[in-house]
Amino acid sequence: MVGHILPGDTTDNLILAMDCHVGTPDEVADSLAANRVLDHATEIAVQVHSVDPPHDFILRLIELFATQVAPTLGWIDPPYPVRLRDAV
């Protein structure tokens, strides 16, 4: 990996070096809440898996983030949410 200095070769070392947040919804929320960068964030990009899981699995992970992780962090729907299905 170019540009990254890895602190070791364990899975935990890689998770730390790559700023990954993994686990149950509660564990991910706790991990993200400890990251002070989030104090200034207005958006977040979510990669639900680093391999190519089935589509239903990806949708479920996005749903868990939206319904369990985001509300735990205090994120709510904007007052006038844009729905993709309405834009088509």
Image (cartoon, rainbow, N blue to C red):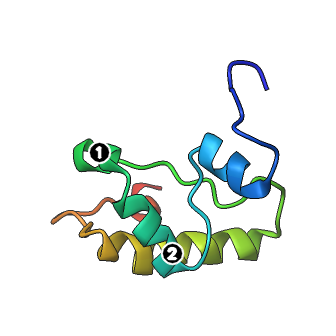
Name the residue furthest left: 79
Q: Is residue 84 left or right of residue 54?
A: left
Q: Nearer the viewer, residue 45 or 19?
A: 19
The quadrant holding residue 34 is: bottom left
Quarter of the image holding residue 71?
A: bottom left
**1 and 2 marks in contact (CB < 8 Å):** no
Residue at the location (31% across, 48% down)? 36
Other-residue count near label 2 (Cα within 10 Å), few / some / many at <14 / 14–19 / ≥20: few
Extreme-front residue of the structure: 8
* Amino acid of disc 1: Ala
Q: Which residue is mark 2?
A: 27
Within 10 Å of the Cα at label 1, are there few (<14), some (14-19), or many (20+) other Cα atoms? few
Residue positioned 50% across, 69% down in the render? 28
Q: Which residue is mark 1?
A: 41
Type of residue at label 2?
Glu
Q: Position of residue 23 (x, y in %)?
A: 61, 73
Q: Residue at x 76, y 53 (%)?
A: 50
